[in-house]
Image: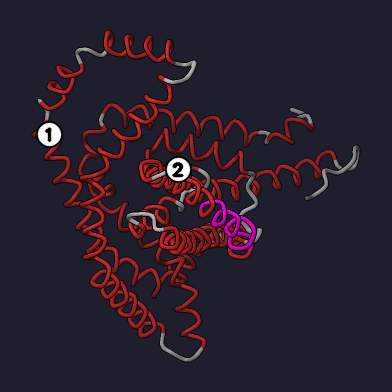
Amino acid sequence: MKVSRFMKFIGGRDLFYGLVLLILIGITIFIYAKVSFIFDPLLTFISTLIAPVILAFIAFYLLNPVVDLLERVHIHRVWGIIIIILGISGLLTGLILLTAPAIETQVKDLASQFPTYLQQMGQGIENWIQASFLAPYYEQGYAWFTSNLSDISSMVTERLGGAMEGVQNVASTITSAVVAIITFPFILFFMLKDGDRFKAFCVKLLPPKYRGEVDRILHNMDVQVGSYIQGQIIVATCIGILLYIGYLIIGLDYAITLAIVAAVTSVVPYIGPMIAITPAIIIAIVDSPIMLVKLGIVWAAVQFLEGNFISPNVMGKTMQVHPLTIIIVLLVAGNLFGVVGVILGIPGYAILKVLVVYAFQKFKDRYNRFYGEDHEPYEKI
């Protein structure tokens, strides 16, 4: 039976084998959905390891270049890893001991005063609205609120009925955090020590025909994800330090706490800075209009430095992702996986992008093989 060129192009008999494979995978997923309870212990084990593994991966990309540098100056890799882990542990312990009292005082004070700040800000906005042309609309909105949400106290009571379940969830979260903190250094140690050998071992499990291409794909993923993680951590740290200096200069309350919040949230591009500035704006509004202006100047200066000097030099052009793509990825990943999705959305997109680019290049090669002689070749970009 003669097979057309188009059928050869889309895979020929291999296409039917692929469809059969997809059907078998679908049947497997259907069966798994019916008996998924059997795998609950395995899923619990995996979910317990996710947090320390993610922390270890992040730390691996930050510390592996340093370990490689120490190895190049003739320090054994194991000793280099031990020196780095002990040094960073000592540095973090010293920083915590030095800054913990001030941070603890500021956090407690901010937690107790923040409702007051919100109330004062709301009162100020209400007074402004009452004196403006929006006063009639405000009255209508307030009337709607009181008529539709008058039973909010009963709703709160119902929610509090599950307080024991909430306590159990908190206890489970604390336990998971403790397990992650304890196990993550050990995972990090073996990743730094045997990461390259583990990758080579996995590649050797594949048929020799595919080893070279798989190794290139893994290398591209490593470059993309590594550069992003290293760059974001460095950029976020720089933003935190600059904001702390700026807050001290203008005399904004809770400077170190707000700077730490900004540094942590800045790990998430675009959305993080908007979250970071919100508590600072509330505190500045309650303080005085002049403080709000000062805060705007500090924030604009930090964003200018970050956008024009820090990010271009730290991040480079490795992550060539359009800003709109980043926003869409963050929104979708956050909706699907919550906070974890927001944090890991961009690295996940980088990995997916490497796979898609590789598949598209294979498609171009296949097109040129079957149609390149008759038509214009599909050029490589």
Kindly identify which residue carries mark 1.
165
The tally of labels here is 2
Which label's residue is closer to the chain start, 1 or 2? 1
The span shown in magenta is 299-312
Circle 2: residue type: Pro
Q: Nearer the viewer, residue 131 or 64?
A: 131
Q: Judge whether 186 appears above or below 341 on screen.
A: below
Could you tell whether 109 is left or right of 15 in the image? left
| Residue 358, x across and y down, in percent | 65, 49
Name the residue located 55 percent from the left edge and 46 percent from the top edge: 352
Circle 1: residue type: Glu
Q: Inspect the magenta stretch and tell me whether residue 191 lies in it.
A: no
Q: Judge whether 163 appears above or below 69 on screen.
A: above
SS under mark 1: helix
State which quadrant residue 32 falls in. top left
Q: Judge whether 86 appears above or below 120 on screen.
A: below
Neighbours of disc 2 within 10 Å: few (<14), some (14-19), many (20+): few
Name the residue located 43 percent from the left edge and 15 percent from the top edge: 135
Q: Nearer the viewer, residue 367 or 135?
A: 135
Q: Nearer the viewer, residue 317 or 33?
A: 317
The label nearer to you, 1 versus 2, is 2
Q: Does residue 208 appear in the picture of this structure?
A: no
Q: Residue furthest front?
A: 131
| Residue 158, x across and y down, in percent | 13, 21
Q: Nearer the viewer, residue 123 or 217?
A: 123
| Residue 381, x across and y down, in percent | 78, 50
State which quadrant residue 93 falls in. bottom left
Kindly identify which residue carries mark 2.
289
SS under mark 2: helix
Name the residue located 36 percent from the left edge and 58 percent from the top edge: 255
Q: Inspect the magenta stretch and tell me whether residue 308 lies in it.
A: yes
